[in-house]
């Protein structure tokens, strides 16, 4: 069994510390916050005693800035996700080979995407499988962007996503649906590590909800709620390999 990914929040505003910790707790439950500090001095003292996997590092700190902190470190054996109110800092941050950066006020979907990058980088292929098993019973949400708002839904409640040109329609276990202003490719990349598979150019399915595979015509995949979707011929071999790797059959 793998350990949780540990994080240190380096942020000089207490309210921002608490808000980021809440977001990580609610939406990125594979991340465990092991400390919150507000200055270069406190960060160096913390790192002498602890080894977090990632720093969520604010640019402006109580006694200097993030780049001064980095210059004081003898080694960097953790990932860095910069947090800033100013987009101009992003280029400088990424030149330092940071994993990612987040703009304030933090968008929850951006945070989720950053932590997915972290998981992909920190865990090897075997650990990723164990990681998914470890978190399978934990609430994990996704932000669904419409033209007017963002709706947060449990990932496991998604049965499938249908492409509608530049839009996407989400279909859920309770037979409800939501339309997103983002295309299906966006969600395919975002849900890559949650056992979703693009069985057809128009359909991205949650393979946890497969009921039956039909070996007729070009192939039919039956999901819960009596949903039947086409499996394209060119996807058939890849889909079979995908299922063999993830499920006993």
Image (tube, helix red, strand yellow):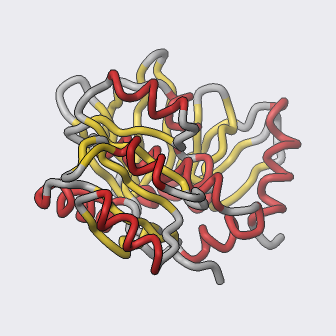
57 vs 32: above or below: above
Could you tell me residue 179's position as x and y percent? 33, 31
Could you tell me residue 188's position as x and y percent? 57, 37
**Residue situated in front as seen by the camera: 113 or 118:** 118
The image quadrant of residue 103 is top left
Taking the image as shown, residue 14 lies to the left or right of residue 138, namely left
Could you tell me residue 225's position as x and y percent? 47, 56
In the image, what residue occupies the spot 45% across and 28% down? Answer: 92
174 vs 106: above or below: below
Could you tell me residue 185's position as x and y percent? 56, 28
User: Farthest residue in the top direction?
Assistant: 165
Taking the image as shown, residue 78 lies to the left or right of residue 247, namely left
The image quadrant of residue 210 is bottom right
User: Farthest residue in the bottom direction?
Assistant: 1
In the image, what residue occupies the spot 21% across and 60% down? Answer: 17
Taking the image as shown, residue 27 lies to the left or right of residue 237, namely left
In the image, what residue occupies the spot 78% across and 58% down? Answer: 243
Q: Quadrant of the C terminus?
A: bottom right
């Amino acid at each position: 069994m793998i350990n949780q990914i540990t994080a240190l929040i380096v942020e000089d505003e207490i309210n921002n510390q608490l808000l980021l910790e809440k977001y990580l707790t609610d939406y990125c439950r594979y991340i465990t916050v092991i400390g919150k500090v507000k200055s270069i001095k406190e960060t160096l003292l913390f790192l002498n005693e602890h080894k977090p996997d990632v720093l969520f590092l604010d640019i402006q700190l109580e006694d200097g800035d993030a780049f001064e902190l980095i210059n004081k470190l003898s080694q960097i054996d953790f990932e860095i996700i910069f947090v800033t109110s100013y987009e101009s800092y992003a280029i400088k941050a990424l030149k330092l080979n940071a994993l990612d950066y987040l703009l304030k006020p933090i968008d929850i979907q951006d945070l989720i995407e950053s932590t997915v990058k972290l998981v992909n980088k920190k865990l090897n292929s075997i650990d990723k499988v164990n990681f998914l098993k470890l978190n399978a019973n934990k609430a994990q949400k996704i932000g669904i962007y419409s033209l007017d708002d963002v709706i947060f839904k449990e990932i496991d409640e998604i049965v499938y996503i249908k492409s509608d040109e530049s839009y996407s329609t989400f279909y859920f276990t309770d037979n409800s649906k939501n339309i997103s202003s983002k295309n299906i490719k966006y969600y395919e990349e975002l849900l890559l590590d949650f056992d979703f598979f693009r069985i057809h150019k128009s359909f991205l399915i949650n393979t946890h909800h497969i009921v039956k595979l039909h070996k007729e015509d070009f192939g039919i995949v039956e999901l819960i709620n009596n949903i039947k979707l086409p499996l394209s011929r060119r996807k058939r071999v890849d889909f079979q390999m995908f299922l063999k790797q993830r499920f006993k059959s």
